[in-house]
Amino acid sequence: FPTSTPQTDPMVSNVTIIGSTASGDDDSEGVLLRNGTAGRLHNFLITGPAGMGECLEVSGAEAQANAEGGSLIMTNSIVACDNGENFKGNATSTLTTEDWFLGQSGNIALNGSANLNLDLDGFTPLAGSPVLGAGIDASTVDPFFDSTDYIGAFDGQTNWMDGWTVGVNGGFPANVQNAFQKGLATDVSSQFPQITGKPVYKLGPDTVFTEDTTFTNDAY
């Protein structure tokens, strides 16, 4: 419902988006702004591997009208995908998405993620990375935000994901036990002889979780 009101008009700052090669009904994409999208987007880092969809697209007459009228903006952001398709289509009636993006303050398009100078984890900027020092101070846009001077979600010094996120820091948090370790699941591998390589765990009926618990990658 792209013309429905009231219209969402978010302010979003310091986001890192890393695409994938996952397949399905649609390709994995970076940012797709569509269906009447408005908003003020700052300090975005959009990247991804060869084989993903486009990095940035503005789709649909309503979203394109917002981009043309200034109610959809993106500033101090970097687009750097490895698929040769940083941009797709037109963002307004007269500008390609690339021209719309590059015509706004502080935006940069790079030819591939290698030019981002990121650590091996794929998201932490190293010294000399173009994301460092290139961002707008988000607190001057709105006092809700912390003070920043970098593009993306990471400042190169602090990994705020440590200790509570799963799948991006080399495994599960070390201080959280899995369901089997806590006695919430039992080993039922003997019931599934066709499944090999790892044990099979089964949760008990009506299991209630009262504290942080993981589902281990070391079992099915």
Image (spheres, grey):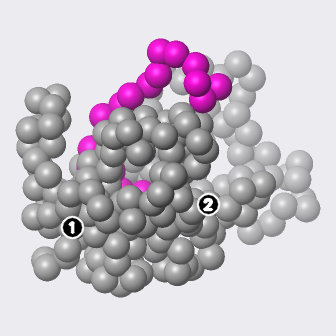
Q: Residue at x 10, y 47 (%)?
A: 137
Where residue 169 sits, quadrant-wise, is bottom left
Q: Is residue 52 left or right of residue 103?
A: right
* Residue 85 horizontal/vertical position (percent): 53, 74
Q: Residue at x 32, y 55 (%)?
A: 44
Q: Residue at x 38, y 28 (%)?
A: 9
The residue stretch that appears in magenta: 1-18
**123 relative to 91, above or below:** below
Q: Nearer the viewer, residue 74 or 131?
A: 74
Asked which secondary structure carries label 1, the reply is loop
**140 relative to 7, above or below:** below
Tell me the residue that label 2 is attached to: 28
Q: Is residue 71 visible?
A: yes
Q: Residue at x 61, y 66 (%)?
A: 53
Tell me the residue that label 1 is attached to: 131
Dot 1 amino acid type: Val
Q: Badge 1 local density, few (<14 within 10 Å), some, or many (20+)?
A: many
Q: Is residue 93 left or right of residue 41?
A: right
Considering only order in the chain, which callout, 2 or 1, is on the residue closer to the N terminus? 2
Q: Is residue 70 left or right of residue 182?
A: left
* Residue 105 horizontal/vertical position (percent): 21, 57
Dot 2 amino acid type: Ser
